[in-house]
Image: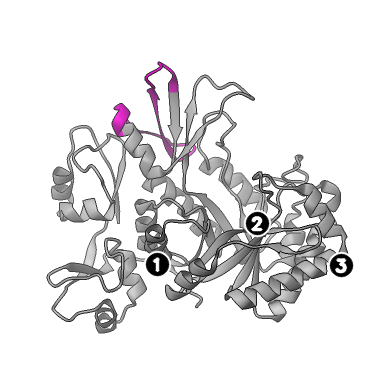
């Protein structure tokens, strides 16, 4: 796997010639909508095949996989242009193995809303271990507020991906309610009702585990939150389910702030089967322009986390989006617009901006002026920044990574991930 950074004057064809690869394969793998409009500074992921199979009449992915001692899932990972297992044609070239030594196994969680585009979902599932469906809500009495998740659960299982149920205290207004959390955490009857409703729903729906995402929990509920996680984990483990708890990105035990104070790393690490560190949102909607997950800031969280939680219990969060910030930044007034990583490159092309790379944050960015004369700065993810985060995963020896979120397809992420690691499947 090669990450090529486009230089001024380069074309797909000159780049393909440089690496002696098929230009159409570069276009297809990177899903370039406008291959003749490359942006200086954008990345291209170039896969270097080792074994290539030419499809013969009557071939299927299943019999090709069997012939070469591999899996259909791995064929889908190495050939992202194949959107369905039966969508292959005689004469088509299929990459069976890459000329790349794998670093080892990785577990991958992807978060999605029930309305995810089904084509995006099916293209993404070959790269996931777990699909977490966002989100079941709660009532003060411990009842669940359901979601339309049946189809996603079925599709995930068809692809060998374990579906995770997510519970949160998110309200209809899109805010986390610490009052609701307080009620559940301090009312044993409501809490027991909630746990039994979770078990019942998971069994009926076919979920494999639970993801707990309680944010902005009141500091005085810190111990009660840990107790709740322990109660949930004990009950669900008895039924054969696993529990993952999302944690705010802390850098010290006594870090002030409502987001952090009730998230007790060592206690929650003990109480839960796994934890997800939400290592993103340094750059955020209402903040000043900066990378969403600067590697130097992420590292500070990881350095603290490994002193409190076993490494093989940790999933590291990775963002799958960027922000378009309007300058100058005015606190309380400015509001950045979220955009996809593919959309960021398209925007750079449209406005004629060259993409730069911040070596400290390990993230790409560019600036431009809109038609009202306002300056913008855009931060997003590319193949380099994804590899930098995966380098951290390997350096710290974690169990897996979790992507917030997989609603918008980001081809280069999955190309880099599947080139470097063997993605674990638990079903």
Mark 2 element type:
strand
> In the rendering, at what x and y percent does residue 349 appear?
29, 33
Q: Is residue 368 magenta?
A: yes
Please report whichever mark, 1 or 3, sits nearer to the chain's N-terminal start: 1
Query: To which residue does mark 3 refer?
Result: 189
Visible residue check, residue 95: yes
**395 versus 243 height, above or below:** above
Q: Which residues are magenta?
A: 349-375
Instruction: State the CA–CA distance, disc 1 to disc 3.
Output: 41 Å
Mark 3 and 2 residues: CB-CB less than 8 Å, in contact? Answer: no
Q: Which residue is mark 1?
A: 126
Q: Is residue 424 visible?
A: no
Viewer-nearest of discs 1 and 3: 3
Q: Judge from the rendering whether residue 261 lies leftward or rightward of residue 78; answer left or right.
A: right
First of labels 1, 2 by sequence position: 1
The image quadrant that residue 127 belongs to is: bottom left
| Residue at the image position 47 percent from the left and 55 percent from the top | 406
Q: Gap in Å between the C-alphas at discs 1 and 2?
A: 23 Å
Asked which secondary structure carries label 3, the reply is: helix
Dot 3 or dot 2, earlier in sequence: 3
Q: Secondary structure at mark 1?
A: helix
> Badge 3: how crowded within 10 Å, few (<14), some, or many (20+)?
few
Circle number at residue 246? 2
Res. 273 image quadrant: bottom right
Q: Residues within 10 Å of mark 1 (few under 14, many from 20)?
A: many
């Amino acid at each position: 796997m090669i990450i090529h950074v486009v230089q001024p004057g380069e074309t797909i064809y000159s780049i393909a010639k440089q690496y002696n690869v098929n230009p159409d394969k570069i276009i297809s793998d990177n899903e370039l909508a406008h291959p003749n409009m490359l942006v200086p500074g954008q990345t291209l992921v170039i896969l270097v095949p080792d074994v290539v199979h030419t499809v013969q009449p009557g071939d299927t992915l299943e019999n090709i996989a069997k012939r070469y001692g591999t899996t259909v899932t791995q064929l889908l990972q190495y050939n992202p242009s194949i959107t369905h297992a039966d969508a292959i044609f005689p004469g088509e070239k299929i990459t069976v193995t890459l000329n790349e030594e794998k670093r080892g196994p990785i577990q991958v969680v992807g978060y999605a809303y029930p309305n995810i585009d089904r084509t995006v979902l099916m293209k993404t599932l070959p790269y996931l271990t777990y699909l977490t469906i966002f989100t079941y809500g709660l009532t003060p009495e411990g009842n669940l507020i359901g979601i339309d998740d049946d189809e996603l659960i079925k599709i995930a299982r068809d692809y060998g991906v374990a579906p995770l149920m997510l519970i949160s205290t998110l309200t209809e207004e899109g805010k986390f309610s610490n009052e609701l959390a307080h009620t559940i955490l301090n009312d044993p009857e409501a809490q027991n009702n909630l746990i039994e409703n979770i078990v019942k729903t998971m069994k009926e729906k076919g979920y494999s585990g639970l993801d707990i995402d309680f944010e902005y929990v009141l500091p005085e509920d810190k111990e009660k939150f840990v107790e709740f996680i322990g109660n949930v984990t004990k009950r669900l483990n008895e039924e054969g389910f696993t529990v993952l708890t999302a944690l705010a990105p802390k850098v010290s035990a006594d870090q002030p702030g409502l987001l952090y104070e009730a998230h007790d790393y060592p206690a929650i690490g003990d109480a839960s089967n796994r934890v997800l560190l939400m290592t993103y949102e340094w750059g955020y909607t209402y903040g000043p322009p900066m990378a969403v997950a600067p590697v130097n800031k992420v590292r500070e969280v990881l350095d603290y986390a490994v002193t409190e939680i076993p490494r093989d219990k940790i999933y590291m969060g990775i963002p799958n989006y960027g922000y378009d910030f309007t300058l100058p930044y005015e606190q309380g007034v400015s509001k950045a617009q979220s955009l996809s990583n593919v959309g960021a490159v398209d925007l750079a092309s449209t406005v004629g901006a060259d993409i730069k790379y911040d070596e400290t944050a390990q993230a790409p960015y560019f600036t431009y002026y809109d038609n009202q004369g306002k300056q913008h700065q855009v931060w997003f993810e590319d193949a380099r920044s994804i590899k930098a985060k995966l380098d951290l995963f390997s350096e710290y020896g974690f169990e897996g990574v979790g992507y917030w979120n997989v609603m918008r397809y980001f081809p280069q992420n999955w190309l880099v991930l599947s080139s470097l690691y063997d993605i674990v499947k638990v079903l």
